[in-house]
């Protein structure tokens, strides 16, 4: 039996630079992870199955984690059958790449269970065929992501520690919908403004998300969360990925716990977490 942690992704910098012919957008991201994670259990079984006890509405046929397993099974002619149990914590369709991270964890887990000896680079390539965020999630380390988000360059992580309060309004927001409505602007941020930051203030002042305005426009709950949190706290706040989750950053653990308690009063899907190295 293999147990893998599937960490939630955060975009510290999210630039959308142009629309491509293939329907995707060219991007320039700085991505990292937080300690918030799903737990994935992979074990040999009588039949192939995937269970998601806390999110039974996720169908097997569209579950990226299951599709990742099927892809590995086909590529490496794997014998027998597998049961995948996903203990979900990361909010679903929330802009934190939960589904992609689960899929990446399955690729890593199958690699271990069957002793396939695959490199991270190879696992990322396999993931790229299933979704743009999966290669990053295979590594789950500070990285610049370009292309449609699947080209990963790892960056040595000297970022300061940060406490992160995650506030999800409990509605799903589809990534394709946000990209479709997005109008490209010339407001791009150099990813190294954040990647090279060694103190908290420099880092949070350089955070940037091109999709933030679009997410706010198409999902009113995003603005509602920002207004609610903003009434009481002036910490750096940003939309996570394509939304609708909102992230608040602080270098003060006590403050983070207070913000979390306040968020939780109104939003059930609120979490306290920290950035990972
Ligand atoms: O790659 P993935 O399947 O996760 O992408 C889902 C959808 O999100 C794409 O079909 C596309 O509509 C949108 N997308 C995009 N540009 C990207 C990544 C995703 O337009 N770089």
Image: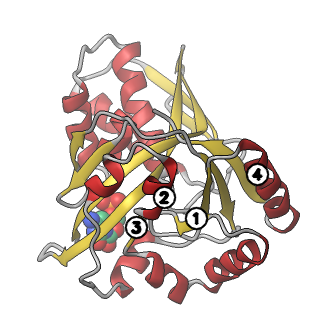
In which quadrant will I find the N terminus? Answer: top right
Gap in angstroms between the C-alphas marked 4 and 1: 13 Å
Q: Quick check: 67 above or below 77? A: below
* Separation of residues labelled 1 and 2 (CA atoms): 6 Å
Q: Earlier in the sequence, mark 4 or mark 3?
A: 3
**Gap in Å between the C-alphas at discs 1 and 3?**
11 Å
- Residues at marks 1 and 3 touching, judged by CB atoms closer than 8 Å: no
**Number of other residues with Cα within 10 Å of mark 4, as a class: few under 14, some 14 to 19, many 20 or more:** some
Q: Is 91 on the left-hand or right-hand side of 213? A: right
Mark 4 / mark 1, whichever is N-terminal: 1
Q: Mark 4 and 1 residues: CB-CB less than 8 Å, in contact?
A: no
Residue matched to label 1? 236
Residue pushed farthest top? 115
**Pair 4/3: label in front:** 4
Q: Considering the numbered disc 4 on the image, is that residue within a helix, a strand or a loop?
A: helix
What residue do we see at 67% from left, 64% from top? 168
**Which picture quadrant has residue 108?**
top left
| Residue at x-position 71% and y-position 41% | 53
252 left or right, relative to 184: right
Q: Residue drawn 59% across and 57% down?
A: 92
Which residue position holds label 3? 208
Residue found at the far left of this picture: 21
Question: Which image quadrant shows ligand 1?
Answer: bottom left
Please state, as top left, top right, bottom left or bottom right, where the C terminus lies in the image. Answer: top left
- As measured in the structure, the alpha-carbon distance from the residue carrying label 3 to the one carrying label 2 is 9 Å
Residue bearing the label numbered 4: 255
Quickly name the residue at label 2: 204
Q: Residue 139, position in %: x, y?
A: 34, 34
């Amino acid at each position: 039996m293999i147990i893998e942690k599937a960490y939630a992704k955060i975009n510290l910098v999210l630039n959308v630079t142009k629309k491509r012919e293939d329907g995707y957008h060219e991007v320039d991201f700085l991505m990292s992870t937080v300690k918030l994670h799903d737990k994935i259990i992979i074990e040999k079984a009588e039949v192939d199955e995937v269970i998601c006890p806390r999110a039974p509405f996720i169908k097997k046929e569209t579950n990226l984690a299951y599709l990742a397993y099927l892809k590995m099974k086909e590529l490496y002619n794997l014998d027998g059958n597998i049961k995948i149990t996903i203990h979900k914590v990361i909010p679903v369709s929330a802009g934190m790449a939960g589904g992609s991270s689960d899929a990446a964890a399955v690729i890593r887990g199958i690699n271990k269970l069957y002793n396939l000896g695959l490199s991270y680079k190879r696992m990322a390539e396999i993931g790229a065929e299933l979704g743009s965020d999966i290669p990053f999630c295979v590594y789950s380390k500070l990285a610049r992501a370009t292309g449609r988000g699947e080209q990963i360059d790892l960056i040595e992580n000297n970022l300061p520690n940060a406490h992160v309060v995650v506030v999800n309004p409990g509605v799903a927001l589809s990534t394709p919908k946000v990209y479709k409505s997005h109008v490209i602007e010339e407001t791009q941020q150099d990813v190294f403004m954040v990647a090279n930051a060694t103190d908290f203030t420099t880092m949070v002042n350089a955070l940037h998300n091109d999709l933030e305005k679009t997410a706010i426009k198409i999902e009113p709950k995003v603005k509602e969360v920002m207004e609610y949190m903003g009434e009481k706290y002036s910490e750096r706040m940003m939309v996570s990925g394509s939304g609708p989750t909102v992230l608040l950053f602080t270098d003060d653990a006590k403050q983070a716990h207070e913000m979390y308690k306040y968020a939780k009063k109104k939003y059930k899907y609120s979490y306290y977490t920290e950035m990972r190295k």
